[in-house]
Structure formats: structure tokens, C-alpha cells
Image: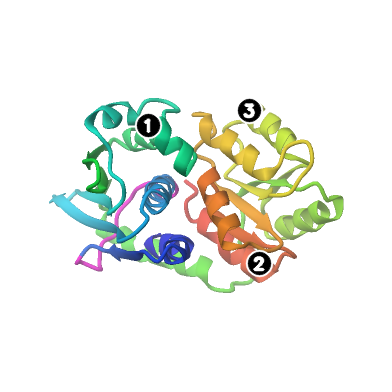
Amino acid sequence: MLEHIDNLLRQSAENKHLNFSISRPSRPDYHLRGDPLRIEQVLINLIGNAIKFTEQGEVSLTVAPVLETPERVRLRFEVRDTGIGMSASTQSELFKPFNQGDDSITRRFGGTGLGLSISKRMVELMNGEMGLISAEGQGSTFWFELPLERPPEKELPQTEAAADSISQAAKGPQLNGLRVLGVDDNRLNLMVLEKALKNEGAQVTLASDGLECLQILEAQPHDFDVVLMDIQMPVMDGLTATRTIRQNPRLAHIPVIALTAGVLPEERQAALDAGVNDFMAKPLDLHTMRKLLAHYVRALP
């Protein structure tokens, strides 16, 4: 998960000439049970905001245990930046729904992707807590802590074997059980996408624009594991649809992968700001698609 976050966000930091680092737990043998997609979404939002609000210096993620027992580990995630920081009054408003802090910050830097209030709610749904340490002109540290269970020792080889079986180019469908909503205004693209996904065992629903995508999700908020979203579409484009998804507490947990024919650095940042989790190049490469979507299959219950 941390490697995926590094691959996704490091370029955004380097484009602003910022140092970006991830500090992992000192013990490499942790096997913990949690919700990797929710944790990843919260981290992408916090790190993306840190990069956006930092004009020079560094952004870092530190993951470390704060309490360990034979049954569980309490992990602390800290995202630190050397950005603009914020006043105590701004901090008190920051986690309220749809609040983006000071109006001057909003005008200067735009929205905040997934939204801090929704990120906080996600953490609380995982029985964790989130907080903030900041001062004007002195950067910010957003942190959250989660209690994660250790699986019984007898289950560890099975867990590792399951992960290995997905990462290998195994015979047979590799996306069994994955419920995908594909969104594209090009009928041929949708046909190709549907055929490729069904051949890999996925369940596929199609939409021709962002508005239709939202209508489907709002009617069936618990029926999809991932959305594949074209960016340039009539009626409603992919970024507008993604922002709307992120602002809806019933839908905000759903990962969105942008389908793009080519992404400039500023376009990539705009997509991340909207709440996109990842990118998939068009025309689709089947091997790349399988590898990327397997990441979401591993997170299925």
C-alpha cells in the first residue's frame, strides 16, 4: 500500500521541487488486518493536500506503532509538511463537512479532494481517531491512529499465498468478484472495457457520462468496488463526477481510477485534487489493467 502511494504522489511533489519521504515501521514482518482501501484513500487525501499547500521544503509520511499487544497493534500515521500552516480558528473549522478553511486559502489553492471531514469519518469508522498540529507559517502535521488486529499465526501462510496468487500471472480470471462501474462516452471503448473485465471475472456496469455514473451510484451506493472514469465527457466530465462522489458520504469510500489518453503534470494534479485514486492509460493495456485492478481485488472482504 505504501509503495502504491509513493508511486502515485511522488511525481506531484517533485514537480513542485519538494522533498517527499515515507518512513515505514522498523519491523518488516507486520501482518495486520485492516481496511487498506480506506486507509489508502485517507493517506492520499492528506498527502495530496500537504503537497498542494506546501510551496517549498518537504512533505513526509511516517508510520509507526504506538501500542502493541499479542492480539493487535495501534498504528500512528503522520503526514507532515513545511507549508503555510493555519491558525487555531481555522483548525477548529477544518473537519466540519465541506469546509475548506480560510477563504483566502481556498481561492489560492482550490478544493481539498476527498475532504477532511469525510477522511475523519472514515478513520472513525475504523475505530480510530484523527487530529492536527499546526501553526500559521510553521507547517502542519495531520495524524490518525488505528487499532489493527494481528491474524492468528496459523493464517499467515494462507494470507501470503493469497497475495502471491494475485500478483503472479496465474491462469484463469484474476478479477473474480470485483464489481466495476465503467464510465466513458465512447461506445467502442465501453465495449472493449466490458469484454476485457468480464473475461477476468469482474461484474461490469456501464455509464456513458459522469451524470449517468452518479445516478447509478446514488441508486446503488453499496454495489460497486471501483469506478473506471473517463475524464473528457459531455454532459458531465469525469473530474466533476469524481468531486461529487467525494462530497457524498455514502459514496466517498469508492475508489475512482481515471482513464486518460495522456496526462500533463498539472492535469494529473487536478485529477488528484478532485479525488481520483489512480490512473489507467488509454488505449487499455490488458496486463496493466489486471495488475492495477488486482490491488482492489485484494481489498475485497
Q: Report the disc number at residue 172.
A: 2
Q: Could you tell me how far apart the alpha carbons at marks 1 and 3 are, in whole angstroms?
A: 31 Å
- Quickly name the residue at label 3: 218
Compare marks 1 and 3 and give the one earlier in the sequence.
1
Residue 85 x %, y %:
28, 43
Compare marks 1 and 2 and give the one earlier in the sequence.
1
Give the class, few, some or many, for how many residues have Cα within 10 Å of label 3's Cα (few <14, many ≥20).
some
- Residue 30 is at least partly visible in this image: yes
Q: Nearer the viewer, residue 210 or 132?
A: 132
Tag in front: 2 or 3 = 3
Q: Report the disc number at residue 182.
A: none
Task: Please give the range of residues in magenta.
Answer: 26-37
Q: Nearer the viewer, residue 197 or 112?
A: 112
Question: Which picture quadrant has residue 26?
Answer: bottom left
Give the class, few, some or many, for how many residues have Cα within 10 Å of label 1's Cα (few <14, many ≥20).
some
Residue 162 lies, with reference to residue 184, above or below; the image says: below
For numbered disc 1, what is the local secondary structure? Answer: loop
Residue type (three-letter) at the residue carrying disc 1: Asp
Relative to 249, is 172 on the left or the right?
right
Tag in front: 1 or 3 = 1
